Image (tube, coloured by chain):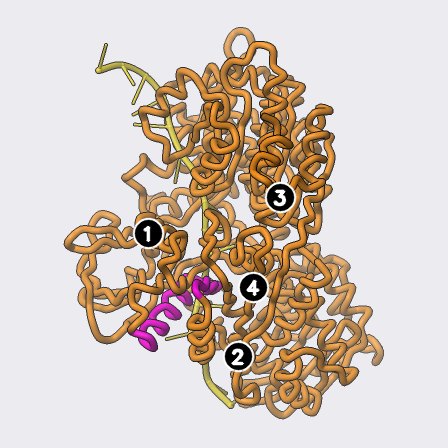
Chain colours: A orange, B yellow
Amino acid sequence: MNGEQWFAARGWTVFPFQREVWDAAAAGRSGLLHASTGAGKTYAVWFAALERAATVRSPAGLRILWITPMRALAADTLRALQEAAPDWQVEVRSGDTSSAQRARQNKRLPDALITTPESLTLLLSHADAAERFRHLQMVIIDEWHELMGNKRGVQTQLALARLRRWQPGLLVWGLSATLGNLECARQALMPDGVIVEGHVAKPLLIDTLIPAAPSRFPWGGHLGVHMLAPVIDEIERHSTTLVFTNTRSQAELWYQHLLEARPDWAGLIALHHGSLDKEVREWVELGLKQGQLKAVVCTSSLDLGVDFLPVERVLQIGSAKGIARLLQRAGRSGHAPGRVSRLTLVPTQSLELLEAAGAIQAVAARDIEARPVPHKPLDVLVQHLVTIALGGGFRAPELLAEVRSAWSYRELSDEEWQWALDFVARGGQTLEAYPEYRRVLPDDEGVYRVPDVALGRRHRMGIGTIVADASLQVKYVSGGRLGSVEESFIARLRKGDHFLFAGRILEFVRLHEMTAYVRRATGARGAVPRWQGGRMPLSSELAHAALAQLALAQAGRYEGPEMQALKPLLAIQQRWSSLPTAQDTVIEAMHSREGWHLFMFPFAGRSVHLGLAALLAYRVGRQQPATFSMAINDYGLELLSAQPLDWGALLDAGTGADIGLLSTEHLLEDVLASLNASEMAQRRFREIARIAGLVFQGYPGQGRSARQLQASSSLFFAVFSKHDAGNLLLTQAQREVLEQELELGRLRATLLDLQARTVRFHAIKRATPFGFALMVERFREKLSTEKLSDRVSRLVRQLERAAGP
DNA sequence: GACCTGCTGCGGGGTG
């Protein structure tokens, strides 16, 4: 039965995009299919693959490979594929696969295999890999938008390059949500192919929960519990609601507040985030699927994965940070053809009303972020070289050509290749003396292989690019796992202290072998664990949309309930200062007991503001002695100095006093000089060292402590910096800091924008609504800076110990 | 009109 017939048999409509996929595949073309969820993408490519596989003359072994970014998705996909082709042997291969099935698959792979990028790479590390993939006809990469922008995507590219070389006629199809750079998404996956648009009209409704008394709404802060009452109302009115928060501790607090306000909801609401134990999470997921839960408070942990049909409503507490994320989350509700996706933004402070208004506009305009593809990361390449040396071995010139056929490495130079090869063969310039870093060696015929079984086993256990921070397990004294928290949090607790975790108040009992033992407690909530997570900046798309709303407000147009609610606040801002827009740079200078303040609101996201604040401080400091403390958020920055400074003159080119503070000349050198870029690079290097296989994470079940891991990567960093300055992994760490943490390209664009804007200078008497949040932020930053220096000195002590006699 | 912020994803191999 082909797709057309199968759809007809169930009375389903065949959409034009499905036919487009079948026709393209029948003509031997690869492609990328992008569509909103619930549009029938899975069946479209699956039937294309079945037809393709049926053309093989002597079908044997694996013919279709299905790559998914999440194990949890594999089970659902398996069900769908089996339903559409009951006579096909389809299986899953992932970390969850039982050892019995694993052994069977190692003898003979099924007709079709659903797997993760990591498990696929592991398959490629077997000596007979080429033979086992010999009959492969088609590869499907599901949720490609999730992979393309990170190193897991690069790992996938390398695996595909390998498969393509063994099977030049291989068809590759990617499935993706809509993004700002579709053509790039396609290129990263296949040298040549079509883009198919799977448009199925899917109603989407986004609105905002407006605070009852907008004039008393806080100007700063991010937790948003003052919105508790209206949020409870919303949950009450719908069958099942997902409540997204931006951080795990925020999720814990919201869950607790909801339960305190509505004790009758015990058992009906639940909590879900990445640090909770797998079993706990699976229980919540099942409850959602079966419609037994009224609400789940969660983080991005529920962005992807299994479809929860009963979810009617999505709430987003705090900034969504980007349009793509917003759409992804909205799509978690009304997840069936014809049903409406419904998302409500819950602002936690006043300026998030502005962001909400912008977000709604940007969604309507489909102004969706691009996901940049990483450019030749050498840590991933180094890992790949060892994998392939295990997987049957390689000859250097052949593998070089294959690697260059992967999009991310198309510009890999001969020198870089030679360096990577030398690094795995010899351990590079500094590690030559250690046999465990001579990981691949050429035999008499010039074929590079892994010389030692133990090295091979160790490598296989480190395959993958996800580097998680080492953490402590949390368990009840009576048994039963709850999840994990970071070492540094537990280190601050004393016996008997209470803390809030996994939705419960717990008493810390003792620490033993990387496990924190706890028991249930009552009474005071105590501390909430904080995890060292990413710090996502506001996307340019969303920032521009917010600025556009300000421009409208400046012209007296307040459209929509968000801007109406914000009107009184913007009026104060205009009275005391003025509104920042895409035409006007607002600069506020203030003198207080603390010193001389500068406020500036470029609306370029927190990472750019960090670079900009440091740059301004550095460039001013070159002119006249001054020291600064600074604060940043997604909307702007504050510089505070003890000495008086005439910021109006310093920044205004019109007065002739401009000293090039906003110049893009010598940008790189100035940024490097102004920030502690080397410490940032050292942090980055931790991840790189693990991926490149320098630091062994330990055997399963016996994890090593964060300290051990951190100390050994720091040691490598120190040794390379001192004795092997040409080490390209160090260069990569610096590049990743500049590109990803400081977003240098975006900083440059922001400087050019600022140069083109008119400066509106205001001497103010007290912090304006826009400036207020920054002052609040500075108090927090001060705290974290102290903690940072603690961390640094601890690190130094460890290094000394590690390097000691 | 001085705060409760910081995401997610994966992963062994061989034999009885």
> Circle 3 sits in a helix, a strand or a loop, which is it?
strand
Residue hosting label 3: A176
Label 3, label 1: how many angstroms apart (C-alpha)?
28 Å
Q: Which amino acid does label 4 sit on?
A: Arg
User: Is A95 situated above or below A433?
Assistant: below
Of the numbered discs in the image, which one, if any, rests on residue A220?
Answer: 2
Residue A82: x percent and y percent? Answer: 47, 31
The N terminus of chain A lies in quadrant:
top right
Magenta segment range? Answer: A239-263
Asked if marks 1 and 4 touch (Cβ < 8 Å), the reply is no
Label 1 or label 4, whichever lies nearer to me, is 4
First of labels 2, 3 by sequence position: 3
Label 4, label 2: how many angstroms apart (C-alpha)?
27 Å
Is A584 in the magenta?
no
Label 1, label 2: how many angstroms apart (C-alpha)?
36 Å
Asked if marks 3 and 1 touch (Cβ < 8 Å), the reply is no
Asked if residue A394 lies left or right of residue A802, the reply is right
The answer to whether residue A417 is visible is: no
Label 2 or label 3, whichever lies nearer to me, is 3
